[in-house]
Image (cartoon, helix red, strand yellow):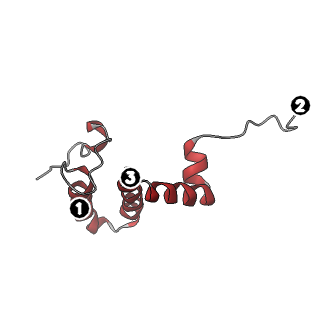
Amino acid sequence: GQDGGGAEEDVSFRWQCVEQPIGKLLFRRFLEREPGLAAAGALWAELEAYECCEEAEREAAAAALRGRFFTPGGAEHCGFLSPAAIAPPPGEDTP
């Protein structure tokens, strides 16, 4: 065979832009430079920070994320997200 190992190269978005540090950095820089995509880059960064916050801080952090990125009319509203993507988890009340 051409590759000798038989393994196919992983060209998925997750592998290239999430799991590979240099790919992630370059993709984030791309998002930050594109006016229509800057909010997506900011949302990604905030979601990663949310995943690292303490359990006691999560409710307030989730509310801040919803207000900043999921509320129509906001400066960083991510209107490209589907209603399912921004729906709160089952059992979580929204104010």
Q: Are marks 1 and 3 in contact (CB under 8 Å)?
A: no
Residue 74 relative to residue 14: left or right: left
- Name which of mark 3 and mark 2 comes first in the sequence: 2
Q: x, y percentage for residue 4?
A: 88, 37
In the picture, which quadrant includes the N terminus? top right
Please tell me whether mark 1 sits on a helix, a strand or a loop. helix
Counting residues from the start of the chain, the first of labels 1 and 3 encountered is 3
Residue position marked by numbered label 3 in the rendering: 40
Say which residue label 2 marks: 1
In percent of the image, x 53 and y 54: which residue is there?
27
Can you give x and y, in whole percent of width and height, for residue 22 in the image?
Answer: 62, 60
| Residue 23 badge | none
Q: Amino acid at mark 2?
A: Gly
Viewer-closest of 13 and 27? 27
Q: Residue at x 27, y 63 (%)?
A: 61
Using the numbered discs, state the Cα–Cα distance from disc 2 to disc 1 in whole angstroms.
53 Å
Q: In this view of the protein, which residue sits in the foreground, 41 or 4? A: 41
The numbered mark at residue 64 is 1
Q: Position of residue 90 (x, y in %)?
A: 23, 42
**Left or right of residue 93: residue 41:** right
- Say left or right for 58 vs 9: left
Q: Say which amino acid is labelled 1.
A: Ala
- Tell me which residue sits at (34%, 68%) in the image: 54
- Work out whether mark 2 precedes mark 1 in sequence or the reverse, and give the earlier one: 2
- For label 3, the crowd category at 10 Å Cα-Cα, with few meaning under 14, some 14 to 19 and many 20 or more, is many
Report whether 87 appears left or right of 1: left
Q: Please identify, in this view, whether the residue under mark 3 or under mark 2 is nearer the observer.
A: 3
